[in-house]
Image (cartoon, grey):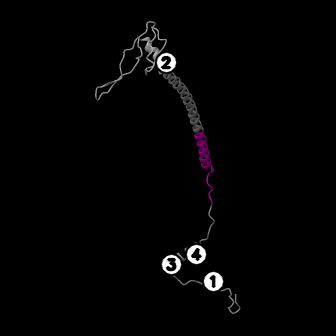
Amino acid sequence: MSSSSPARTSSPRRTLPRLSPQLARAGAAAGRARLSVVPRLRRRAHRVPFVTLVSLVLLGGVVGLLLFNTSMQQASFAAADLERQAASLSAREQALALEVDELRNPARLARQACAIGMVAGPTAAFIDLATGKVSGKPTPATRTPAGTLARPAPGAAARDVEGCAR
């Protein structure tokens, strides 16, 4: 401290003035109860619940991945089956398209017509529906004795089918 301040000397214990009994008890209790800061006790968390939780999360993740992988494999097998089915149906569609083309072949149709007794007409005639007038000269088709169709006149528009034997 500074040199100008008076030096303290130890003085005898001072006595408190006489107080009422209630105040005296309160003062005595205050003298006895001196509070001080006590370090807090740290409680460590139990590790078993944490380890159990982490283990369950990991186990759930592994099981989830396993189920996901299994479902993806099943979807892959289903996709492969559908691709095989699509290839089979595509081949069938092509075969049916070829069959339709064969059935629509004009030479085949002409052979079938000859087989049921039809003959090609030598000339064509048309009727105008509005006026009712016939244009062209209609002539009946004839069959030759050998079973072939008669050839139309050189200027006729109709085509003949040769070799139609009955």
Number of marks in the image?
4
Q: Nearer the viewer, residue 95 or 103?
A: 103
Q: CA distance from mark 3 to mark 4?
A: 12 Å
Q: CA distance from mark 1 to mark 4?
A: 15 Å
Residue 108 vs residue 61, the one in the foreground: 108
Label 3 belongs to which residue? 23
Instruction: Report the residue marked by disc 4.
Output: 31
Circle 1 or circle 4, nearest the eye: 4
First along the sequence among labels 1 and 4: 1
Horizontally, residue 29 falls left or right of residue 110, namely right
**Image quarter hosting the C terminus:** top left
What residue did someone put label 1 on?
A: 13
Q: CA distance from mark 3 to mark 1?
A: 20 Å
- As helix, strand or loop, the secondary structure at mark 4 comes to helix
Q: Is residue 90 above or below residue 19?
A: above
- Going by the numbered disc 1, the residue's amino acid type is Arg
